[in-house]
């Protein structure tokens, strides 16, 4: 019985953490935001999640962020060194999201994406959209 209770508590914590992170990211996309190129520098893997540490620059200032990918058996090593679109809150650039739907190979990729999302932001990289 104790094992079932412990598993239930762990599942509840996991789901709460996922929901909290999703809400934070949705707020970035809903608020005034900007775009940058983020490069994944390292990762930390635990059984239910991988956290990617990424860096990006805005007008010469350096920022860092963390992207949490939830699920069992997340692959992390192939992502190191890759660049993706970062969506950040303009009033607080440290509040950012690395959107892995949009990989950046060269500067022209970033310019094209920034122009494409000038009027409407991209969708966050998960199956369900944010509330409209």
Image (cartoon, rainbow, N blue to C red):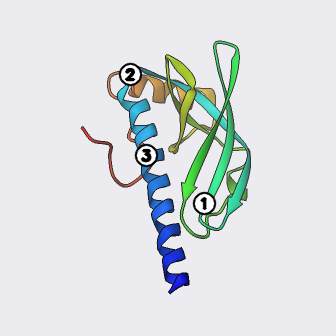
Task: Give percent across and percent down for residue 43.
Answer: 72, 51
In the displayed image of the protein, which residue is found farthest to the front? 2
Helix, strand, or loop for circle 1? strand
Q: Which residue is mark 3?
A: 22
The residue positioned 39% from the left and 27% from the top of the image is 117
Looking at the image, residue 67 lies above or below residue 122: below
CB under 8 Å between callouts 2 and 1?
no
Looking at the image, residue 124 lies above or below residue 4: above
Helix, strand, or loop for circle 2? loop
The CA span between labels 2 and 1 is: 32 Å
Task: Give percent across and percent down for residue 68.
Answer: 58, 50
User: Nearer the N terminus, badge 3 or badge 1?
Assistant: 3
Which residue is nearer to you in this view: 119 or 105?
119
The residue positioned 70% from the left and 60% from the top of the image is 45
CB under 8 Å between callouts 3 and 2?
no
Quadrant assignment, res 57: top right
The CA span between labels 3 and 1 is: 14 Å
Asked whether, in this view, residue 34 is left or right of residue 120, the answer is right
Asked whether, in this view, residue 86 is left or right of residue 77, the answer is left
Q: Which residue is mark 1?
A: 49
Screen quadrant of the C terminus: top left
Q: Which residue is mark 2?
A: 118
């Amino acid at each position: 019985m104790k094992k079932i209770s412990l598993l239930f508590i762990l599942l509840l914590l996991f789901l709460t953490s996922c929901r909290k992170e999703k809400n934070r990211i949705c707020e970035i996309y809903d608020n005034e935001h900007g775009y940058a190129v983020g490069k994944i520098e390292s990762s930390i893997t635990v059984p239910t999640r991988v956290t990617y540490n990424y860096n990006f620059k805005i007008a010469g200032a350096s920022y860092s962020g963390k992207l949490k990918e939830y699920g069992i058996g997340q692959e992390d090593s192939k992502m190191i060194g890759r660049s993706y679109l970062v969506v950040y809150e303009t009033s607080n650039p440290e509040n950012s999201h690395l959107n892995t739907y949009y990989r950046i190979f060269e500067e022209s990729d970033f310019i094209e994406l920034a122009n494409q999302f000038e009027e409407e932001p991209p969708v966050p990289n998960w199956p369900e959209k944010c509330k409209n």
